Image (cartoon, grey):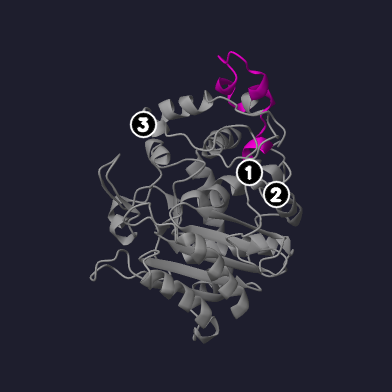
Amino acid sequence: MDATRSETDSRIDKRPASAGQFAGVYKVLQDAIDSRAFPGCAFGVLSGGEVALSDGLGSFTYEHNAPVVERHTVFDIASVTKVVSSTAIAMLLFQEGVLQLDAPVGELLPGFIIGRANSERARRVTLRNLLAHNSGLPGYVEFFRTATTSSALFRACLELPIEAPPGERSEYSDPGFILLGKALEILNRDSLSGAARKGIFEPLGMSATRFRPARPQWQQIPPTEIDDTFRHRVIQGEVQDENAWVMDGVAGHAGLFSNVPDLLRFTAAVLAGYHDSQSEEPKLFQRETIEFFAERQGPLGSSRALGWDTPSAESSAGSHFSTHSIGHLGYSGCSLWIDLEASVGAVLLTNRTWPDRKNRAIRKVRPAFHDAVRESL
């Protein structure tokens, strides 16, 4: 590891000497734990290129002897995978001229076209549509109920009906990102996990971020739920999303595990690229690329950019993140929001689905957390 990498690591890993400035943040999160919105959380804030906050609260579960959550605790980040892996890979390929946004999906994945009785809509679906969630594909399908292998699940995804003309309907689509992940593998001539590791995680020093954590690490990861309907066991250290699990834990829509320091490194790289910073922070992305992928794609009323989400009315980002912000949520209770204009990023990692998926309190916690962050700054 070179001196520059070491200096960056020390800044990212640094815990503030005093949390007094962020008392409001701690209160929001402790109140959430006390009301059982989630048993524990890790959280971090980047401001002006420096780590302003990095900490953990609560425990892995509600048992009195459960391990405590620390700032380095690794979580299943669910759909935050879509931006930290899939979208980031797409951004790099776009910069290199390898990814053409308006290339038809069927050119890369012929099975998306072949065999359809009416293939007109499918032929019009582009990589841009997949990234923008306006492909006409359904939002969610329980492929895992019938598909028992990764190849069978992928085949079922290829055969999904296109329910609306591409570009005319906005519907957040996991199947769309499953297909995107496969298309990115074709363009990269590498697995999704390999491309993410080589292109993003290793250059940024994101040493804790990976698909499919090794089994000895599982007990160091907070469990996401007690699964009584599919796997019939506690889900800990393996991806919660059932479709991603059938795909051997590596998919375009979910499967990634990470922690606060690593996600702050990723945030720092985005902000360094956007502000064309002369600092020694790694800059994977060019400003033009970030601006392009941060632009809303439509149809009218959709908050979706290319891979990223943007603040909307009653956004999970709260009321203080500017319209020039990008972010994403994860079903397990995780989120990442970056205000490009203010050079502020906020990470919140929780296992709000423990012990089951019924609790929806995270919907109120997220905006309160982000409001408290911005008010503290």
128 or 232, which lies in front?
A: 232
Badge 2 or badge 1: first in the primary sequence = 1
Which quadrant of the structure image shows residue 337?
bottom right
Residue 35 within the magenta-colored segment of the rendering: no
In the rendered image, is residue 115 in sight?
yes
Question: Which residue is most to the right?
Answer: 288
Residue ID for mark 2: 293
At mark 1, the secondary structure is helix
Which quadrant of the structure image shows residue 371?
bottom right
Badge 3 or badge 2: first in the primary sequence = 3
Residue at coordinates 57% horizontally, 16% vertically from top-left? 116
- Do tag 2 and tag 1 residues touch (Cβ < 8 Å)? yes
Residue 125 within the magenta-colored segment of the rendering: yes
Residue at coordinates 46% horizontally, 62% vertically from top-left? 349
Q: Is residue 75 left or right of residue 344?
A: left
User: What kind of residue is marked 1?
Assistant: Ala
- Do tag 3 and tag 2 residues touch (Cβ < 8 Å)? no
How far apart are labels 3 and 1 at the CA level? Answer: 30 Å
- Do tag 3 and tag 1 residues touch (Cβ < 8 Å)? no
Which quadrant does the C terminus fall into?
A: bottom right
How far apart are labels 3 and 2 at the CA level? Answer: 34 Å
User: What kind of residue is marked 2?
Assistant: Phe
Residue 196 appears at what percent x and percent y?
53, 47
Residue 314 appears at what percent x and percent y?
62, 60
Residue ID for mark 1: 90
State which region is magenta: 108-131
Give the numbered dot on residue 145. Answer: 3
User: What kind of residue is marked 3?
Assistant: Arg
